[in-house]
Image: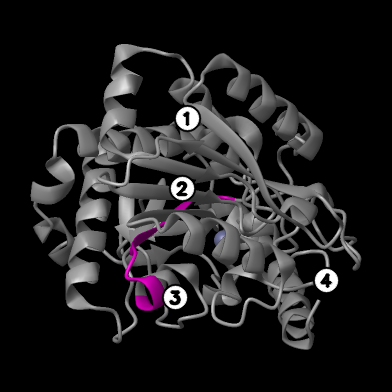
Amino acid sequence: MKKNGLVLALCLVLIGSLFGTVQSAQAEGEGPNYNGNETIQNERLHTYDELVKSLEQYAKRSDDMILEVYGQSIKGRDLYLARFGDNEDNPTVLFLTQQHGNEALTTESALEVIKYLTNNSKQVQDIIDNVNILIAPRLNVDGAEGDVNFSLDDYVAGTHTRYNADGFDLNRDHVNRDQPETKALHENVIQKYEPDFMIDFHHQGTQTTLGDTDEYVSGSILYPTNEGVDPEVRERSKQLGAIVYNAVDDKGYGLLSKYRGGTAPTISRNGLALEYGIATLLFEMRGMADHYYEPYVLGQKSNGYLIQQGVTAMKAVLESFVDGSIETVDTSFWDTLPVSGSKGEEHEDEH
Ligand SMILES: [Zn+2]
């Protein structure tokens, strides 16, 4: 882990021990966070080997799915891309998950969508006829296995880490691309297939609220905010966000806030919009599989609806290319969407 990360980790452990009791009391009721009350059963998530096995099984179900290895992690694990459609007249969308290894349910969502896209139905054929799809599940394959060159003793479960094997944050590496995972993603996915749209799926803490209210959100979204991004790209990003917002808000579990995010180009939301003109959206789901800051960890009771939230978002975006709503959707909701608040200590850098 880098020095800054280590200092932050120590601060967070201290804050966690000071405020842990208070947060337990506040968090009761609405889809509990971990707070020591639940066991963490991360073995329910796909391991790396299970992920690869599932991808290989899905690829056999449909001629439309092409499964590629686009690079390797520090520890030598292959990075997989699922591709559907290759029509240069169509737009291309990229769904990226788990740049942070401890933000795991987004990959479960991606696997569900890949499975759906291999069902050979008329509905899926309509999608593939209208949009080229790139799904890159789990960029941080080493962190997700806890197979890293630093100790996870401070983590609640000790099974998943945000950082890659050498302690780097992949979502701060989209300018220099010093890490093999980000380098491979840029060179062998983004520059090769030139997506027009990208959703970057993450998880945030469990205590994020809708504005100043007491309501916990199921997720938070944001478009590229770097001032150098072409206004037309930002507007298309807001349209992408509108499709996701409308679909998720329609669900009983869905409650989204506007993410409080920075402008750094090293973050994919900003960097990909700035460098390639890709319309981007950050989508942060509630809670993490593991963390050294206890209030960030969500027990497995909420996993089902959070996985479905990711599936809903991805499918809605794909269908918006079929009915053309991606081009016409109203983006004015962004002007009134409440910005995230929090009931507890949050750390901007840790999402
Ligand atoms: Zn993240």
CA–CA distance between discs 3 and 2?
16 Å
In the foreground, 195 or 287? 195
Residue named by callout 1? 113
**Image: magenta residue range:** 274-287
Q: Image quadrant of residue 189?
A: bottom right
Q: Which residue is drawn at the image coordinates 75% and 75% (left, top)?
A: 9
Q: Which residue is drawn at the image coordinates 30% and 86% (left, top)?
A: 228
- What amino acid does circle 3 point to? Gly
The residue mark sitting in front, 3 or 4, is 3
Residue named by callout 4? 166
- Please count the marks in the image: 4
Q: Is 27 situated above or below 187?
A: above
CA–CA distance between discs 2 and 4?
25 Å
Q: Which mark is residue 95?
A: 2
Local secondary structure at mark 2: strand
CA–CA distance between discs 1 and 3?
26 Å
Local secondary structure at mark 1: helix
* For residue 113, side relative to residue 179 (left or right): left
- What amino acid does circle 2 point to? Phe
CA–CA distance between discs 2 and 1?
10 Å
Q: Which residue is drawn at the image coordinates 30% and 40% (left, top)?
A: 317
